[in-house]
């Protein structure tokens, strides 16, 4: 992501913390404008480059298929689709009378052009339907076939993700074919874009139901307290969303007591995990890892860290995600059982603590509040709990850049990670964060084992009829080998002013909650 101008950010944050963002004489003119906080600049919204946060794409660009509640596939720019019996051909019927916001017609030729910008390209081989692409054939003015070299069971789900699958106007590229402007078919058009904020206006030629208000102002406010104060004062209408302008559980509880402000929650689609470094010399065996699992009181994490806005879990993928597997029983905290596990793993207790082969049971728990807000407090809570079982835990608090660097090189013993959530899971988290043959870059690995890789390959390639059973084998292996410690599934948190009505949290947090909103 491109760098934010620090001077502009400081000005915005200072204004939010104190005086009104808007002069009084402009307030009336802005009654038809929804003002939302974002924690970082929107950027260019290039569909093929990882340079912008994902949250604004859906306002401007649309996919063939939309991700609905609990993973239901909904029509998008495709009215319907059909998958052949062998799974190698997907036939789409596209909506008619759809145009890009620059007036260019969206038809089968435009769709083919858009798909061929990324499908079959090496940079997007992490998307199964791209890696398997053989050809895209226009069969009519608004029909086309996607031919695959081999069946991809999650092909339709992959077509719901945010980037790169959405459609750009064929006229919005330069002579080299690079995106020159964010021109899509969506309900909103970007009119101004800087490192301090982005303005959008309603697309009056939108094919679907048009928004009831005419403008959106996205204001870059990196500081959560400033966002909260601006919501209280009425300078912002909406804050929240894990990937947009995060609202901490503690702040949400405070806002529940604020006049003219409402807090909305929805079931989470991502889990917070305590993960083991594949290179840790401490956690080479399942028994030691299971001792960690038995030392933790998840309910205390829910109440102390998440203020009740979470549910404890023993599952890596939340139940709100399709094919997330059997719900495992959450283990009760049992220090004696944890110590017994350590003994079975060869650890010996003495007056100087636990040792094995001359090494102490000393672990580094790496955290970053920038990467996961509240993770330092959670680490300190778990530090206390693990100490009772005999672990010597050092909490290493680092910045966002450092944690991503150290994740790649596995320079830690324990760390917190989050699953990707909808619409990317379960295949996104499993393929990128578990499969050892895939370079997951700064995201790191939840766990990596050559023994697990073929089980993952079989699960990801299984046909629909046997997919859930094949995926269950992945979850069973992780559970039986104590390869990860799932902690909680945080609820998705938003807060908004009472002038905002019909507020509905979308199915995933990479999307903006603006559909159906009415301003009063």
Image (tube, rainbow, N blue to C red):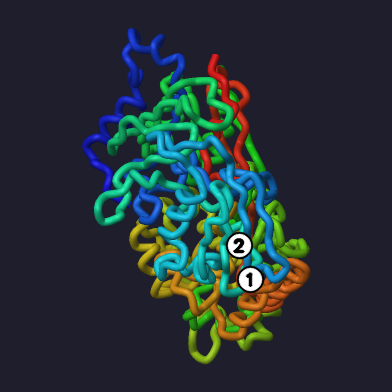
Report how far apart the C-alphas of labels 2 and 1 lie in the structure.
8 Å
Residue tagged 2: 155
For image coordinates 32% across by 13% down, the residue present is 23
Q: Nearer the viewer, residue 201 or 371?
A: 201
In depth, the one of 258 and 32 nearer the eye is 32
Q: Going by the image, does 143 lie left or right of 341?
A: left
Q: Is residue 80 above or below residue 207?
A: below
Single out the residue that lies furthest toward the bottom. Answer: 357
Expressed as whole percent of the image width and height from the top left, the position of residue 313 reads 69, 58
Identify the element where label 1 is drawn: loop
Are the residues tagged 2 and 1 within 8 Å (C-beta)? Answer: yes
Rendered residue at 32%/42% (across/down) = 181
Work out whether residue 118 or residue 351 is closer to the camera in this orientation and state it: 118
User: Which residue lies at the image location 28% right of the left edge and 38% below the top edge?
Assistant: 195
Q: Which residue is mark 1?
A: 151
> Is there any visible trace of residue 376 in the rendered image?
no
Bin the neighbour count of mark 2 within 10 Å (Cα to Cα): few under 14, some 14-19, many 20 and up.
Answer: some
* Residue at position x 57%, y 20% in the image: 518
Vertical comparison of 335 with 92: above or below: below
Whole-percent x, y for residue 36 in the image:
45, 30
Residue 391: name its quadrant: bottom right
Q: Is residue 346 visible?
A: yes
> Which quadrant: the C terminus?
top right
Q: Is residue 228 above or below residue 249?
A: above
Question: In the figure, 369 relative to 386: above or below?
Answer: above
Secondary structure found at label 2: helix
């Amino acid at each position: 992501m491109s760098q934010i101008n620090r001077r502009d950010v400081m000005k915005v944050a200072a204004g939010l913390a104190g005086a009104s963002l808007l002069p009084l004489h402009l307030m009336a003119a802005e009654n038809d404008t929804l003002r939302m906080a974002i924690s970082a600049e929107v950027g260019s919204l290039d569909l093929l480059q990882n340079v912008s946060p994902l949250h604004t794409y859906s306002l401007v660009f649309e996919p063939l298929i939309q991700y609905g509640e609990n993973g239901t596939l909904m029509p998008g720019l495709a009215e319907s689709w059909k998958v052949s019996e062998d799974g190698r051909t997907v036939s789409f019927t596209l909506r008619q009378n759809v145009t890009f916001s620059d007036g260019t017609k969206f038809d089968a030729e435009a769709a083919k052009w858009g798909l061929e910008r990324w499908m079959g390209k090496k940079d997007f081989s992490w998307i199964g339907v791209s890696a398997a692409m053989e050809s895209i054939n226009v069969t009519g003015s608004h029909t086309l076939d996607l031919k695959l070299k081999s069946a991809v069971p999650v092909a339709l789900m992959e077509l719901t993700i945010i980037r790169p699958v959405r459609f750009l106007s064929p006229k919005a590229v330069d002579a080299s074919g690079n995106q020159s402007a964010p021109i899509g078919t969506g309900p909103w058009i970007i009119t101004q874009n800087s490192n301090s904020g982005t303005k959008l206006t309603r697309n009056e030629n939108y094919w679907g139901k048009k928004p009831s208000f005419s403008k959106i102002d996205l204001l870059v406010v990196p500081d959560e307290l400033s966002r909260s104060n601006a919501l209280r004062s009425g300078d912002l209408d909406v804050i929240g969303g894990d990937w947009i302008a995060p609202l901490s559980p503690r702040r949400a509880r405070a806002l529940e007591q604020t006049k003219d402000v409402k807090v909305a929650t929805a079931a989470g689609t991502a889990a917070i995990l305590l993960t083991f470094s594949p290179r840790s010399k401490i956690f080479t065996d399942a028994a030691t890892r299971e001792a960690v699992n038995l030392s933790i009181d998840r309910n205390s994490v829910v109440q102390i860290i998440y203020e009740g806005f979470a549910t404890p879990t023993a599952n890596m993928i939340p139940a709100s995600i399709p094919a997330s597997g059997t719900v495992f029983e959450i283990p009760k905290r049992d220090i004696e059982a944890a110590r017994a596990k350590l003994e079975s793993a060869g650890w010996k207790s003495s007056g100087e603590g636990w040792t094995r082969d001359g090494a102490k049971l000393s672990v580094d728990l790496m955290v970053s509040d920038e990467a996961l807000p509240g993770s330092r407090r959670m680490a300190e809570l778990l530090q206390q709990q693990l100490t009772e079982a005999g672990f010597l835990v050092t909490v290493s608090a680092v910045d966002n850049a450092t944690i991503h660097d150290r994740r790649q090189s596995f320079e830690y013993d324990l760390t917190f990670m989050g699953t990707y959530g909808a619409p990317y899971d379960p295949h996104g988290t499993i393929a990128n964060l578990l499969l050892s043959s895939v370079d997951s870059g700064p995201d790191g690995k939840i766990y990596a084992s050559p023994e697990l890789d073929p089980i993952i390959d079989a699960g990801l390639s299984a046909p629909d009829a046997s997919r859930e059973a094949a995926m269950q084998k992945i979850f069973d292996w992780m559970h039986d080998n104590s390869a990860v410690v799932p902690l909680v599934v945080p609820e998705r948190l938003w807060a908004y002013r009472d002038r905002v009505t019909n507020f509905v949290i979308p199915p995933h947090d990479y999307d903006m909650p603006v559909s159906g909103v009415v301003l009063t």
